[in-house]
Amino acid sequence: MLHRLAVFATALTLAACSGGSHTAGGPEGAPPEANAPVERPAEASGADIYPFEAAVRDFPNGLRAVVVPTGLPDIVSVQIVMGTGSRDEVEPGRSGFAHFFEHMMFRGTETMSADAYQTALKQMGGDQNAYTSDDRTVYHTTLLAEDLDQMLAMEADRFQNLSYSEADFRTEALAVLGEYNKNVANPIQKLFEVQRKAAYRDHTYRHTTMGFLEDIEAMPEAYDYAQSFFDRFYRPENAVVLIAGDVAPEATFALIEKHFGAWERGYTPPNVPTERPLAGPLYEHVDWAGPTPPWVTVAFRGPAAYPTDDNAASGDMQALDVISSLGFGPSSPLYQRLVVEEQVADVLAASFPDSRDPGLLTVLARVTDPADAAYVRDEIQKELARLTVQPPEAAKLADLKSALTYGFAAGLDNTKAIADAIVPVLSVTRDPQTLNEIYRTYASITPEAVREVAARTFTDRNMVVVTLAQGALSPQAMAAGSVDTHVAEARRAYEGTQRGNRPPMASDMSGDSPRVPLAPGDPEAVRVLPQPSPSPLVSLRLQFASGAADDPEGKEGLAAITAQMITDAGSRTRYYSEIQQALFPLAAGIGAQVDKEVTTLAGTVHRDNLEAYWDVVGRMILEPGFRQEDFSRVKTQTLNAIRTGLRAGNDEELGKEVLYERLYAGHPYGHLNAGHAEAVDALTLDDVRRFYREHYTLDRLTLGVAGDISDADLSQIRANLAMLPASGAARAAVPDAPEASGGLAVTLVEKPDARAVAISMGHPIGVTREHPDFVALDLVRSWLGEHRNSSAHLFQRIREVRGMNYGDYAYIEYYPGGMFSTMPPAGLARSSQIFQVWIRPVPPEQAHFALRIAKYELDKLVADGLSQEDFENTRAFLSKYVALLVSTQGRRLGYTQDQTYYGLMDYVTWYRSELAALTLADVNRAIREHITPDRMDVVMIAPNAGRLHDELILGTPSPMTYASEKSPEVLAEDAIIEVYDLDLAPGDVTVIPVENVFERPVFE
C-alpha cells in the first residue's frame, strides 16, 4: 500500500480478516516494445518521497527489471511482481485461481523438484513467501546477497518451466480450502464477501481474493484449466523483477538477463468487465452464528487509484485518502466522539484501498451495544454528508501531509520494506517513479478538491450498507440509512460556522492546563541499552520487568490494562484526543506489549520530531491521566478483544492460548496476558493506579534506544525517566516450569460454529536461551516446523504430501500472533517456556488423523533423531536466516533487550557461535532429554467436540480419503497412522464450552 498511515492501527482487526485481498494494484501500463534493451535511470530529485535511485531496464521479451541499491549491507530482497490477481478471473466458476496458482508455483519444475527447491532455499537461509491481492501476485524472498545468482536461477526456472502432477494439484486444492476455512472463522471475512456480492454485478471484484466457496470446492477438478492459467498469465510482459539491497545495477541486470532472457512472450490481458454504476442505496445483513458485537459498514464505489492514461478520475483517490484519515482516523472528531467519549463503538476505521479499477471504500465500526447500531450508522453517514459540503481545515490538511512524509520515511527501515514500497506501482505502471508522482499529487491537494471528490462519491445511489450480528438487529438498524438526507443539515451547519457560529467541539472543552517541562533527575540512574546507527529514525523501547505474572489473584489482566492506560489514554495535561492530534502530524505513536515477566512501551519517530514526540509520550509514561472515561473505554476494548477477537474470531490463537493456560494452571503464567474477562470487568481505576506506582519503577526499567539520537536528547530522556520511583513492590516469584502431564491429555473446546479444527499441543521445557541446550533444541524446532516455512518437516508431511491444511509449525519460545507475522517477535523474554506444535485448522473429519500424525512424527523424532544430512542442512539454514531476524532497527533493539534479560551477548554473534559448536550428537541428545510426546497436552477447537471425544477415547480408526492418487509409501504410512494408539482413557479427554474459556479460570 502507498499511504496507509497510523489511521489503520485501529483497523488491525481488518488486516486479520481480509487475508490480503484488499492490498491493491492498478491498471496495467503498456507493455514495452520488443526491441533492444532500454535502460532508464531513475529521475530522483530532492523532492522525491522515495529516496533511493531505482535503475530500470526493459528486455526484448517484455520483462522489466528494477534494481534499487539501498546502501544496507549483506541482504537483498527479490520480488517478482505479476500483474495478475483475482481481478483477472473472468471465467464463471473459476474465482480464486490467481491465489490458488500462487500455491502451485512452489510445486517444482522438470529439472528441480519441489523438495530440491526447498532444500536449496534452506541452504541459503532465505525467508520466502508470496501473496495474492485483487490486482497482483507477488513472490518475495529475502536472503544474503552472496546467494542472489542461485536464487535468480531457481526463480527463472519455475517461472518458465513450472511442472506439477495432477495428484499434487488436487492435494494443494485441499490446502487452499483449509486456508478458506481458517479465514472464515473471523466474522469480518464473511461480511466482506457479502459486501462485494452486493456492490458488484459484472466486475470480478465481486469475489474476494480467496474466491467463491463453491469455486474453491470445485478446484480439484480443474487441472487442465490451471495449466492454461499459467500459460496465459505467467509471461514476461506481465512481470517485473525487482531486486533491492546490497546490489550494483549493472551486475544485477546481467544476472537477470542471464536467467530470464529466454522467457517467452505471450501475454494477452483479459477482458475484465466494466462495472455498471451502483444502483443504491443497497443493504444486506449477515446473521453470524456465534457471539459477536455487531459490525456496521458503509461502503461506496471509489475511483481507480493510479495515474494512468485510462483513469479519468486520476488524483481522486489521493483526495479520498485525506478523508479516510481526517474523517475516520483516531484523531478525527467522529472517532473521538463515538469511541472515546460516547463509547458506543470500540472500533472505527476507514478501509480505502488502492485498486486498479474502481473499488470499494468502506467505513466500518464495531458497535458496543446492538441497540446503538442504527445510531452509529447514522453518525457515520452524517459525517460523510458533512464532508461533501465542508472542506477540511487547511491546518489539518497540512498535518496530514506531514504525517504522510514522516510515515513513509518510517517504513523504509530495512531492505524488504524498501522494495515493498514500490511493488504496488510496479504492478500497475511498471514505473517506480509513479510513487513519487502520487506523493506529488498528495502535496498539491487543496481543501476544496477534497470536498468536490467527497460530493461525487458519497451519495445514496453509490452506497452499500452491510451489517453483521448474531441474529437480527432492530428494524431501524437493518436498513441502509441515508447520506443524502443529511446533506442539507450539514450545509446549514457549515454556513453557520462560516458566519462565526461554530458549535463547540470536544477539543475546545478539554481544559488542558499550561504545560511545564518534565521534571529532570539524574540521567545515570536510568539503565540504557544504546544502539547507535545513522538512521534518521529514533526507536525507543522502555522495558519494565513486570508483566502478567505480577497480576494479583482475582485481578488477572491488571498488568495489561495498566499498560493500555499509559499508551491508549490521556496524560495529566492532555486528554486522549489531544494526544492523538499531537502525534498525528509526527506519524508516530506508542504501543504496549505485555508478556508474563516484561512490559515494553515502544515507539519510533523521525529525529526531526523527537523533542515534540517526547513532550507528548514522556508525559503519558510519567504523568498518566488515569481518567475514568478512558478506563471504561480501555476495559471495554479489552473485553471485546478476549470475548470476540480471540474467543469468537480467531480459532488458531485461541487454541494456542488455551494450551498455555492448561499447561500453567496454578502457576503465575496460568492466565491469558489480557486476563480473564470476569476479572477484567471487576478491575477498578484504583487497581490501575496502585499497579502503576508499584511496578513502573527505576529498578525495573531498561531503556533501549536506536538510531541517530544526539547525546543531549538521550540525556534529556534519561533525566526525565529518572523521576520514576526508585523501587516499588517486590518482584513476583516465578517458579520453574511445571511438570509435563503424566500422559497424553486432550482438551476439546466446543465451538459449534467452527468450520475446521485448530490443534495446538505441547509440554513445558526447562530450556530458555541461557540453557546450554537452547540452540540445539532450536535447530530441532526449525527442522520440525520453522514458522511459515514450507521446507520444514511437519509442513511437508501434513500439508504438502496430504494437503490437510495451511501449515504446521513448532516452537520452543512463546510466539503470539503467528497468523499475521512471519518472524518471531521480540520483547517476550521468559524464565519458562514450552515445546509446542501448531497444526493449522483441518477439516473436522480429519482432526483425529491430524492428531495422530503429529504424535506419530514426534515419536519418530524422539526414536530416530535427526540424520546427519538434516542436521547439516538445518544448521546451514539457521546460520544465514538468523541475520534476517534482526533486519530492522526495531527488531535489533528488541532482540538486544531480550539477550540482556538472559545475560547473553549480541543475538546473531551468540547464536552463530553456539550453532557452529553443535554436533549431531548434541542435537539428538537434546531431543531425547527435552521432548516427551507421551507427556503432552493437546487443545483442539472443534465444532463436533462430543463426537470427537468419543472417537479419541475409543481409538476409532481415522482413515484418510484423498481427491488424488497417493504413492504406495504414503498409503502404507496412512495405514499405520489411522490406527496409531494415542493411549487415551476416558479421563484424558475433556470438553469445555468455548464461552467458558478465558471468562474465568477453567483449569485446576
Image (cartoon, rainbow, N blue to C red):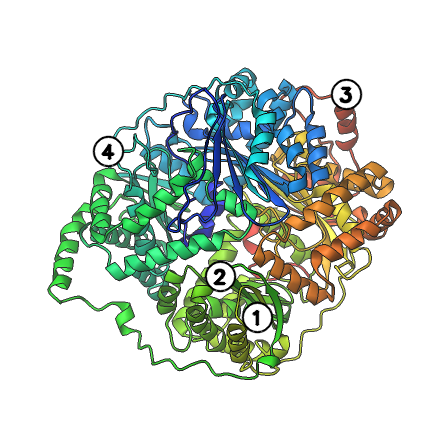
Under mark 1, the amino acid is Lys
Q: Which three-letter amino acid code belongs to the residue tagged 3?
A: Pro
Residue identifier under label 1: 555
Q: Mark 2 — residue? A: 638
Mark-to-mark CA distance, 2 and 3:
51 Å
Q: CA distance from mark 4 to mark 3?
A: 57 Å
Q: Secondary structure at mark 4?
A: loop
* Cα–Cα gap, marks 4 and 2: 39 Å
Q: How far separated are the C-alphas under marks 1 and 3? A: 56 Å
- Indicate whether 263 appears above or below 916: above
* Residue 277 x/y as whole percent: 25, 31
Q: Are marks 4 and 2 in contact (CB under 8 Å)?
A: no
In this rendering, would 39 be left or right of 820? left
Mark 2 or 1: the one toward you:
2
Q: Earlier in the sequence, mark 2 or mark 3?
A: 2
Q: Is residue 6 among the parts visible in the rendering? A: no
Structural distance between the alpha carbons of marks 1 and 4? 53 Å
